[in-house]
Amino acid sequence: MDDAQSSLMKRGLEKAPHRSLLHALGLTREEIDRPLVGVVNAASEVVPGHMHLDRIAEAVKAGVRMAGGTPLEFPAIAVCDGIAMNHEGMRFSLPSRDYIADSCELMARAHAFDALVFIPNCDKCVPGMLMAMMRLNLPSILVSGGPMLPGNVGPHKKADLISVFEAVGGVRAHTVSEKELLAMEENACPGCGSCAGMFTANSMNCLAETIGVALPGNGTIPAAYSARLRLAKHAGMQVMELLRKNIRPLDIVTQDSVTNAITVDMALGCSTNTVLHLPAIFGEAHLDINLDVFDTVSRRTPNLCHLSPAGTHYMTDLDLAGGIPAVMAELARGGLIKTDCLTVTGKTVAENLKDRNAHIINTDVIHTLENPYSRDGGIAILRGNIAPDGAVVKKAAVAPEMLCRDVRARVFEGEAKAMKAILDGEIKPNDAVVILFEGPRGGPGMREMLSATAAITGMGLGKDVALLTDGRFSGGTNGAAIGHISPEAADGGPIGLVRDGDIIHIDIPNRKLELKVDDAELARRRAEYKAPNCKSPYGILRRYASLVTSAATGARYRDI
């Protein structure tokens, strides 16, 4: 393939030094002559979801070799959001997304790869790699590490990481013993893979499949299953087919595939973090989507799944029920997705669904269009005088009692103070925990508040207490957790004007979030308002704060 990208560094007399360095890697002339495929491996001994990715990478490389290519592996970082949660480490999670994208681009462009296979699994690694995929626009495919199995914590009782977070609140409320908590923490996460529910990692891996840049099965085949290794081998073989046919990510990622992704997002009840990541990914593909697009799609898309934390099913249940192809087939039956979109199989969505005979196997796990959990989607976009640029809530995980309610503000500057008040029993029914200065710039880093929301649920307050913040939430968050409130407090957003005792009106069905304080009082508060100094002592976060945009636009970097 003399016209291959890698010819820039390996063909011709003047490239003899380059070939010498390739030989130093142990490559033969035959291997050098073949297309060079970069294999981006985010394996780690720190992240449980990534501890097995070396096996996935070996399978991918086997597939590349079988199809006539030469794989060259290089690493990527990843943050485990669960381990980083509820301490300073969480400030570094969202920024890692953009650094992952940058590092993949640096390696791919510097070494003139012909094609790429991306191997992420958890949280910010998936969108980071997808952002790089769009930027580079080389023949590419993504294959994730797959979801973790749920843990067994008692007779006929399963659990996941969120169960442990919520049990912390249960200990404080004396509904869970410390012995039970110890047993749960040892057994809830039984091994490798992304946490077992429809949290951020699994949401993004499912949506990668929906967009068409990952093979069918990518989102739901469990990490521990040999089928995951077979999928990885097929991904390695298929990237060579994409190279031969010159099918690139921007041929696949179109406005229709964007709409498909958001539609499946709403049907599955995915993490609210998808509202940050999809605009960033599609922005790299030169497609502009905003919060209004999410809300428009949500209003017309029925919610078909209630996986943990919204319900009692796990990713393994979704896989056995037919997986993402079954969900897409059901949506296609109602004309809710476009089926003529191209995918990395080289076929359209319609052809993929036909090849797999995609259909719902278990209607308890995937509801039909005629019997949805709700007539609209799993995520709602709220607006009002407290969130003029928008706020995000995982509607599918909100108790019916909290869908429309007036709550009394309890205001805290930062998560730590709020967490202490929750665990000390200071938060009462009808309260709204309002956490300020946790946005992208004000944090900086836009921390997730899973510990706080899980503690509220674990203490039996999930049906009576809301949490509002300019920060964000884990995909594992349960309850009336309203995040991404924009503009953020650090940018002078109205959320910074909320005071203890203020009444906040929440109306999720009608997409409203209103602070019941008259305009004159708000004007007086604004005149007196002075945002605190949010400058971080860490250079990487100072740079991030100087570049990041609002959560309402996906917390992307501003153009420079």
Image (spheres, rainbow, N blue to C red):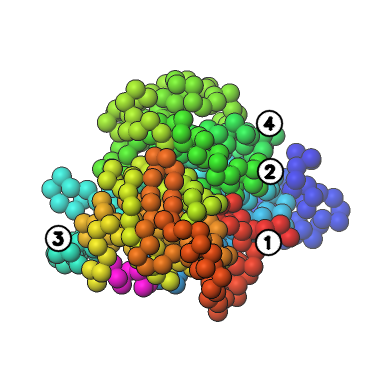
- The label nearer to you, 2 versus 1, is 2
The reply to whether dot 1 and dot 4 touch (C-beta < 8 Å) is no
| Residue 421 magenta | yes
| Circle 1 SS class | helix
| Circle 4 SS class | helix
Residue at the spot of label 2 = 286
Of callouts 2 and 3, the N-terminal one: 3
The image quadrant of residue 481 is bottom left
Residue at the spot of label 3 = 175
The reply to whether dot 4 and dot 2 touch (C-beta < 8 Å) is no
Residue 435, image x, y percentages: 41, 65
Q: Residues within 10 Å of mark 4 (few under 14, many from 20)?
A: few
Residue at the spot of label 1 = 24
Q: Residue at x 73, y 51 (%)?
A: 112
Disc 4 marks a residue whose amino acid type is Lys
Q: Nearer the viewer, residue 191 or 305?
A: 305
Residue at the spot of label 4 = 245
- The magenta-colored residue range is 416-423
The reply to whether dot 3 and dot 1 touch (C-beta < 8 Å) is no
